[in-house]
Amino acid sequence: MFRRNKSAEPAAQTPAIDPNLPADQQPKGKPTPSRKEAEAARKAALSGSADPKAARNASREARFKEREAARAALMSGDPKRLPARDAGPVKAYVRDYIDSRLSVGELFIPVALAVLLLGFLHVDWVQLLLVYIWIFMLVGVVIDGLWIWFRLRRNLAEKLPNEDHSGATFYGIMRALQLRRFRLPPPRVGIGGKPAKPRRR
């Protein structure tokens, strides 16, 4: 008769978990959140939204804006806005050196397209000619790449001896393989070292 009715007591309220505190700093009497719950709370706090879909959309929009800003910086050619991959006096010299000459590599894509189209002609002498053109083109690209590698190493050692040259020759070879119109940042000099014509917007 003196027993207390347990059903009459109010149910104990489970303390809320503070997502801003790590597990070992939760107040006493509060349950320790699982690792999954803590990670979800941290991501929600960082994104500013507890809605996973809204967080994904916000992250996607942020990445899109970053890519657009990086492309705008490359298109402008402003040295102060260039990404780290293209910034610095070494990369600027490499770009000017590559843009001031006609590289075999920038002819590779047009020649490859011509060979592909002419390959549909089932004429024996045309097929044989295309084989020789293709071999000549590949050999020319390799020789031109080696020449660029040799000249850039020597010129950089002479003109910019105190700068870091790591990756500069590969950077130049890859730029030489691109069509001049699609090079980013845009060329500042034309073939022969003359100032390049501004691109039409």
Image (tube, rainbow, N blue to C red):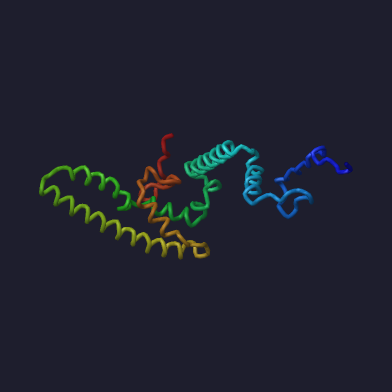
Q: Is residue 135 left or right of residue 99?
A: left
| Outermost residue to the front | 1
- Depth order, front residue of 49/117: 49
| Res 148 → quadrant | bottom left
Up-down relation of residue 25 to residue 55 (above or below): below
Tally of numbered tags: 0
Q: Is residue 29 left or right of residue 107?
A: right
Q: Residue 83 in the image: state x and y as whole percent.
A: 52, 49
Q: Residue 143 in the image: state x and y as whole percent.
A: 29, 60
Q: Residue at x 72, y 45 (%)?
A: 17
- Depth order, front residue of 161/64: 64
Q: Residue at x 66, y 50 (%)?
A: 34
- Depth order, front residue of 87/116: 116
Q: Quadrant of the N terminus?
A: top right
Q: Residue 101 in the image: state x and y as whole percent.
A: 35, 52
Q: Is residue 19 left or right of residue 114?
A: right
Q: Residue at x 82, y 39 (%)?
A: 9
Q: Quadrant of the C terminus?
A: top left
- Depth order, front residue of 170/1: 1
Q: Is residue 119 left or right of residue 28?
A: left
| Outermost residue to the top | 201
Up-down relation of residue 197 to residue 25 (above or below): above
Q: Residue 119 in the image: state x and y as whole percent.
A: 18, 45
